[in-house]
Image: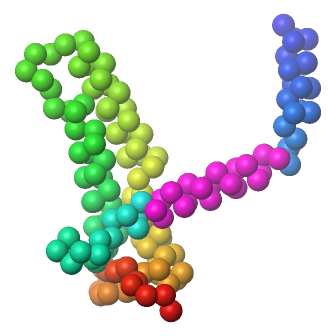
Amino acid sequence: MVPQLVEAYHFLRVLIPAGALWPVLRWSYKRWQKYQEDLVLSTFHLDPAEGPRQSAHGVTGELYVKAALSDARGYIPPKKLTFAYCWRALFYRTRHMMRAKLLLPDKERAEKILRNLWERNLLELAEWSRTNKVYKLRTSAG
């Protein structure tokens, strides 16, 4: 068993050099950041009836509501409980838990993303108080 592990180690050492791991990790982190920025920007609406202004609380609330509605089939039981429903509910609940813990930004992360988008001039500060900053989507660049 040990000679096979030594061969596998040497194969992986040649295949994946240590220097190639850092760019892959950096690329995946930047892609995750871009995904979260796109999620935050998707919560802004141009229609005034839906509310063009968002705070960090509003962003996280809207994202969690969208996630909960898409996974609601796993939380609302049918009239007759079956094995197929239990299996599907396990899938939906696991997906919802993974989405809430890993993909959706929490309030602090949403504040950082909103501030970063504001510094890049994609958002403008609509209102400000000691406890809450409200942003709106910039309509024109400049």
Relative to 111, residue 38 above or below: above
Residue 34 point in image, percent of width and height: 54, 61
Residue 88 is drawn in which quadrant?
A: top left
Tell me if 137 is positioned left or right of 142 in this view. left
Tell me if 34 is positioned left or right of 90 in this view. right
The magenta segment: 20-38
Look at the image and tell me in which quarter the N terminus lies. top right
Residue 40 point in image, percent of width and height: 40, 65
> How many numbered circles are shown?
0
Q: Is residue 69 magenta?
A: no
Q: Going 91% across and 18% down the picture, which residue do you hit?
A: 7
Relative to 54, residue 140 above or below: below
Residue 67 point in image, percent of width and height: 31, 47
Q: Is residue 26 magenta?
A: yes
Q: Going 27% across and 60% down the picture, which residue do you hit?
A: 61
Q: Mainly helix, strand or loop, the magenta region?
A: helix
- Point out the residue furthest to the top here: 1
- Point out the residue furthest to the left here: 79
Relative to 18, residue 65 above or below: below
Tell me if 42 is positioned left or right of 22 in this view. left
Q: Going 39% across and 84% down the picture, which residue do you hit?
A: 139
Residue 60 is drawn in which quadrant?
A: bottom left
Residue 29 is drawn in which quadrant?
A: bottom right
Residue 133 point in image, percent of width and height: 34, 81
Q: What colour-coding does the image apply?
A: rainbow
Relative to 45, residue 39 above or below: above
Q: Going 15% across and 26% down the picture, which residue do you hit?
A: 77
Tell me if 97 is positioned left or right of 1 in this view. left
